[in-house]
Image (cartoon, rainbow, N blue to C red):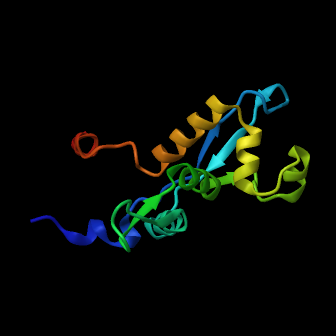
Amino acid sequence: MANLTAFLAQNALKQENEKVVVSKRFVQDGKPVKWEVAAITSDEDDQLRKDNTKRMPVPGKKGMMVPETNYTAYLAALAVKCTVFPNLHDVELQKSYGVMGAETLLKKMLLPGEYDEYLAKIQTINGFDAGMDDVVEEAKN
């Protein structure tokens, strides 16, 4: 039987922040500036999902409601929550793009393809891309 000490909080590997080039359009000293991205906790993710879920009536079923998550808004909130640098909440940065709000700023800063790739990277960093088969295979190696 395996020893449970590997599962103790102090023995778990810490998720390091990642630095990624999100767009080649943001350069400094001739090189693309890397953004810093951090994973969030499951509790934080639950709160983001809850914040972006509404109870909607079921057509034809009087008084019946079902939860409906706005995944576009959820992913935007997730991206903002995970972005360490640049600070998307910085008022001066928002003013430079003529917007208010971090989610709006992120969409304004990035081209549509860049934004989609960034959302995919955010999901990868938070472990949403790895299926159980991938995790098991990686653990074997």
Residue 11 horizontal/vertical position (percent): 37, 67
Does the rendering let one see residue 85? no
Residue 9 horizontal/vertical position (percent): 38, 72
Tell me if residue 4 comes above or below residue 86 in the rendering: below
Relative depth, front residue between 11 and 45: 45
The residue at the point 47 percent across, 58 percent down is 69
Residue 80 horizontal/vertical position (percent): 65, 54
The residue at the point 28 percent across, 45 percent down is 135
Relative depth, front residue between 109 and 14: 109
Does the rendering let one see residue 55? yes
| Residue furthest left in the image | 1
Relative depth, front residue between 21 and 110: 110
Quarter of the image containing the C terminus?
Answer: top left
Give the quarter of the image for residue 56.
bottom left
Left or right relative to 137: residue 51? right
Tell me if residue 71 comes above or below residue 56 in the rendering: above
Tell me if residue 96 comes above or below residue 15 in the rendering: above
Quarter of the image containing the N terminus?
Answer: bottom left
Left or right relative to 107: residue 74? left
Give the quarter of the image for residue 26.
top right
Left or right relative to 125: residue 101? right
How many labels were placed on the picture? 0
The residue at the point 52 percent across, 56 percent down is 39
Left or right relative to 10: residue 140? left
Relative depth, front residue between 117 and 29: 117
